[in-house]
Every structure is written in structure tokens, then in C-alpha cells.
Image (cartoon, helix red, strand yellow):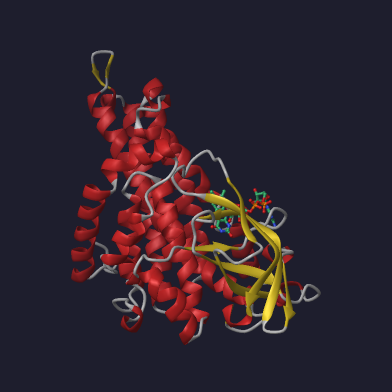
Amino acid sequence: MAHWLFKEEHEILRKSIRSFVQKEITPHVEEWEEKGEFPADLFRRLGQLGFFGLKYAEQYGGSGEDYVADAVFVEEMARCGSGGVQAGIGAHAHLATPPIYKFGNEEQKQRFLVPAIRGEKIGALGITEPNAGSDVASLVTTAVSDGDHYVVNGSKMFITNGVRADFVVLAVKTNPRAGHKGLSFLVAEKGTPGFTVGKKLDKLGWRPSDTGELIFENCRVPKENLLGEENRGFYYIMQNFQWERLILALGAVSAAELALEEALRYARQRVQFGKPIGKFQVIRHKLADMATAIETGRCLTYHALSKFVRGEDAVTEVSMAKIVACEAHNRVADEALQIHGGYGYMMEFPVQRYWRDARIGTIGGGTTEVMKEIIAKRIIKD
Ligand SMILES: Cc1cc2nc3c(=O)[nH]c(=O)nc-3n(C[C@H](O)[C@H](O)[C@H](O)COP(=O)(O)OP(=O)(O)OC[C@H]3O[C@@H](n4cnc5c(N)ncnc54)[C@H](O)[C@@H]3O)c2cc1C
């Protein structure tokens, strides 16, 4: 039975996204994984179908501010079987565009958000640097005021869509002496002199997503590209993290479910000692543990989502959901591979990819350790 958060219209939307994913994404996953990229046209298709506008107002081409609908989009996209495709689409839809919608002015929304909702411009979010990951406030990319421009110098690391993005929502230091109070958000556009892509990074999982290193050398970004107020960037980043972490938790639950389905299928068909391995109690209990871990992750994630959509402070619950769902995803994918035995280690079985793709969940968007720090600070109140 569907959870109470989801109304009839959400279930109709779920059906239509699931059908799109089954027809237009899943059949190509193996090829895209092999190539290490998926076609940019997928952004345009998803834009045409309205899936990038679910949480945005109609005046920008959206269909209403419905975060539950967006959660459905995340859950169903995660069922495509490729974390990399999900990551590229997700970085655009859930990381890069929300700060423009929330903190951008009307002109910026027309210039960046509207074409992004249509899938005509691809976005990325650039926060992490070679020496600043969990400690966001320590980033050192500077933006120095010079007339009606900022001169940006520095580099960004691990940026999803970094190579092919048309614009990057960039975290910069506008006041390097003010610590976290000196951060701002600028939109840097592809083609701006001084903005180059260092290289496309090679990685364990999420293979079809492009993960780039970005370099800024005396790059002049017009001041009209500043999002919101100067030096308020840290608060904007922390707000933006809540949806990013929720979508990582939602995606983890869905992808773990896919790994469980694969393990169940294999346990029914693989025969050893004269019977399907799914008849052995050890395997049955593994499957039961996997299903229980998924349900635990789902319940906590939906609880955090319900607080988030009601506009309540959900930081503690979102952090908990990210830990539980992403750790569960890792365990479930690992057990699914174990249940496949030697075949699980072979590239022709999708379970190896589920295992590789799962690993990033407890790292990206704030590590499990950092989530625990956030929870501890909030409950200990020190
Ligand atoms: C595939 C991929 C895609 C990504 N996409 C993006 C993107 O689109 N945009 C973007 O801005 N970033 C992106 N990232 C970066 C990601 O968010 C960071 O990797 C993550 O925040 C961790 O930072 P770090 O890698 O620098 O690790 P570090 O911060 O150096 O952490 C190393 C270890 O130390 C631990 N640690 C750090 N601080 C503490 C502490 N206070 N207490 C206890 N333990 C601690 C961590 O938990 C971790 O285990 C991506 C990363 C990857 C791998």
C-alpha cells in the first residue's frame, strides 16, 4: 500500500515516470555504463515531459511546488539501474536549480531556471574543492569585486555534470577573512574566459555521470550573477543540503530495493545441493534482513520528507535518514552480490554495478560521519 504522503496524483505520476524509465532509460543502461556517459538529450526529454519542474511554480514552466512529486521522480529514476544516470539528472534537477529558484532574482530565474526546467541548459553545483570537502567553510576559491564583475580564482573538485554543464552554481569566498560568513553563491557560465574543465575524473561507480574538476583563473563573472545576498552563501548551502540529502536517501532506498529484487530473483533460480539457494535458511534470513533494512530506511526517509514538506525544521531527521538509508543501501547491495556468489563478481551481472554505485551514498552530499556530528550537535546542544 502506498504511504499516506503520496496522493492519487502522485501514484499516477509514478506510473508515468516508471513507464518512461523502463522504455527510454533501462534498455540503454548497459551501453551508457560501457561508454561512461549518457546522452545530453535525456535532459531535454525529461524537460519536455515536465519532470524538472515538479517542485517549481508554473510561471517558470513548473507544475506547482510539489516536493512529494519530486520525491516520486527521484524514487522512480533510481529504479533505472544506473546510479550514474540518476546522479547526472539529479545534480541538475535537485542540486543546481533549487538555489536559483530559492535565492535568485527574477532575471536570473528567466536566464537559468526556465531553460533548466525545459532541459535545454544543464546545471551543476560546485562547492567541493581539492582541500575543502566536509569543511565547506574552509573553501578557498575567491571572488574579488572589480567594478561590475567578480574576479574568480580557484578550483572545484568532484563536480557532477562539471564537464558538460552550461552553468555552475559556484560557492566562492567573497570575504576570505570572515570564515563561513564570507561565502557567496555565483552562477558561472560555460564559455566565460578563465573558466576551464581540468579533467573528467575516472571513478569506481556512477560511471555514466560526468564528474569534473573545474578551474577558475582570473575568471570575470558579472555581479548580476550573484545569487541572493553577498556573504550569505553558507546559509544558502546548508539549506540546499537538506533537499540534496533527502534525495540521496530516497534514491538509496529505491536502488536498494532494486538490488533486493535482483537477489530474490537469483535466490529462486540458482540451484545448489539439489535445491534453489533461496530455500537455505541462511540465505532466507539475509533476504529478510535486507528487506528490513530497506523498510527502516524508507520509514525514516518518509518521516524526514513529511517534516520537510510541512516546512518544519527537518535537519536532524534528514541527517538520520541519510545515514540509515545510505548505510542500508551499502549493506543490501553487498549482500545481494554475496547471494550471487562468483557471478556477482562478473561484469555481465548488474548486481556488481549496484554494489559499486551504492558506495558513494555514505560519502557524497555529507558523509555519514558528518551527519552524525550534525545530529550530535543538535541533541547534545553544546
Ligand atoms: C562521485 C562524486 C560526485 C560528487 N558530486 C559533487 C557535486 O556535484 N558538487 C560538489 O560540490 N561536491 C560533489 N562531491 C563531493 C562530495 O560531496 C564530497 O566528496 C564529500 O562532501 C566529502 O568530502 P571529501 O571527499 O573532501 O572528504 P573529507 O571531508 O576530506 O573527509 C575524509 C574523511 O574524513 C571524515 N571527516 C571529515 N570531517 C570530519 C569530522 N568533522 N568528524 C568526523 N569525520 C570527519 C569524513 O567523514 C571522511 O570519512 C562529489 C563526490 C563524489 C565522489
Q: Position of residue 55 (x, y in %)?
A: 36, 74
Q: Position of residue 23 (x, y in %)?
A: 21, 48
In this rendering, does residue 45 appear at all? yes
Query: With 275 as the anchor, is 95 left or right in this view?
Result: right
Residue found at the very far right of the displayed protein: 177
Query: With 6 as the anchor, is 249 left or right in this view?
Result: right
Query: With 25 as the anchor, is 140 left or right in this view?
Result: right
Query: In the rendered picture of this protein, how many numbered marks are placed on residues?
Result: 0
Q: Quadrant of residue 266?
A: top left
Q: Position of residue 14 (x, y in %)?
A: 23, 61
In this rendering, does residue 134 appear at all? no
Which one is in front, 206 or 272?
206
Which residue is depicted at the point 42% across and 59% down?
Answer: 90
Q: Is residue 303 above or below residue 267?
A: below
Query: With 216 as the anchor, is 225 left or right in this view?
Result: left
The C terminus lies in which quarter of the figure? Answer: bottom right
Which residue is depicted at the point 37% across and 70% down?
Answer: 117
Which residue is depicted at the point 19% across and 58% down?
Answer: 15
Residue found at the very far top of the displayed protein: 273
Q: Is residue 87 above or below residue 224?
A: above
